[in-house]
Image (cartoon, helix red, strand yellow):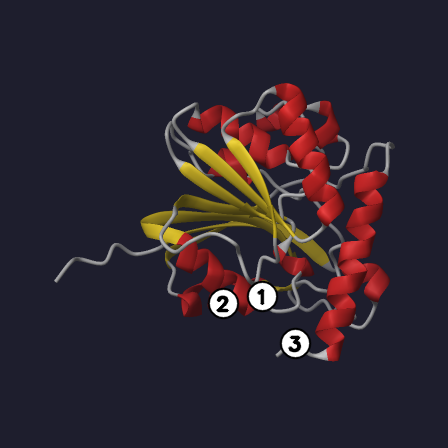
Amino acid sequence: METEKETIIRNAVREHYAQLARSTNPLSSCCSPNSSHGVNGPEEARTVYAGCGAPVEAANIKDGEIVVDLGSGGGFDVFNAAKRVGSSGRVIGVDATPEMVWRARDTATKHGFSNVEFKLGEIENVPVEKDRADLVMSNCVINLAPDKARVFHEAYRILKPGGRLAISDIVVRPGAKVDPTDLSRWVECEAGAINEEEYVRLAKEAGFVAIEVRNDSGCCSGQATKSITLMALKPIINPR
């Protein structure tokens, strides 16, 4: 059962990103989408992009794959993944903020993306069936989740055996501290961050293997935090 603290955090995050979704001013991201990442999404999605890495590029997405984006926001990574999976693939964006989901759906309709869908839901309770995805990705969102262990278990659940995980996120630098009670810093992707070792531990405990962590040079580098991309696999279970 969710605690009062978790509810307060979740509501603060939802309200913050609802305001961003309603905004017409471009969001200043610490790792702004540009040609160096090899992506060029719709302007409506770029405006509210708040990523801290490039999981789409790291994941080596293939034609025909099914991809789920946890915390899809305005859909920037979804639309770029959609170009890679082609007409035979599908990309599903999941976000807990209704205003972001509505905005992303409008963008998809406007630009004719027929191989995407956006679902309203929390990344701790993903509205996607078991063993559905070839790839689960996320970009600077898991740090916002009150129950990060549950997020990793959900990612594992919805992946097919042999499926891939590609997450870019903010972590706390060694020896640094953040204040988890500071809601203003939590919604800005700092106060909810954990350290890299804890991140890897949560992935392992969820069942992931072949875990690799890469530093995202130049993205979201601060005194207390930095950006990483974590890659992992759901093991293939041999049939009995």
Position above or below: 42 against 178: above
Q: Pointers 2 and 1 in contact (CB under 8 A)?
A: yes
Where residue 86 sits: x, y (%)? 43, 24
Separation of residues labelled 3 and 2 (CA atoms): 19 Å
Please state if 133 lies on the left or on the right of 23 as rendered: left
Q: Quadrant of the C terminus?
A: bottom left
Position above or below: 40 against 197: above
Where residue 42 sits: x, y (%)? 67, 24
Query: Is residue 187 in view?
Result: no
| Residue type at numbered disc 2 | Leu
**Residue drawn where x is 57% and y is 63% of the image:** 124
**Residue drawn where x is 56% and y is 29% of the image:** 80
Which residue position holds label 1? Answer: 148
Q: Nearer the viewer, residue 233 or 227?
A: 233
| Residue type at numbered disc 3 | Glu
| Residue type at numbered disc 1 | Lys
Separation of residues labelled 1 and 3 (CA atoms): 13 Å
> For the residue carrying disc 2, how many other residues have a C-alpha within 10 Å: few (<14), some (14-19), or many (20+)?
some
Q: Quadrant of the N terminus?
A: bottom right
For marks 2 and 1, give the one nearer the viewer.
Answer: 1
**Residue drawn where x is 46% and y is 26% of the image:** 84
In which quadrant of the rendered view does residue 78 lie?
Answer: top right
Secondary structure category for the residue under label 3: loop
Q: Nearer the viewer, residue 204 or 19?
A: 19
> For the residue carrying disc 3, how many other residues have a C-alpha within 10 Å: few (<14), some (14-19), or many (20+)?
few
Which residue position holds label 2? Answer: 202
> For the residue carrying disc 1, how many other residues have a C-alpha within 10 Å: few (<14), some (14-19), or many (20+)?
many
Counting residues from the start of the chain, the first of labels 2 and 1 encountered is 1
Which residue position holds label 3? Answer: 2
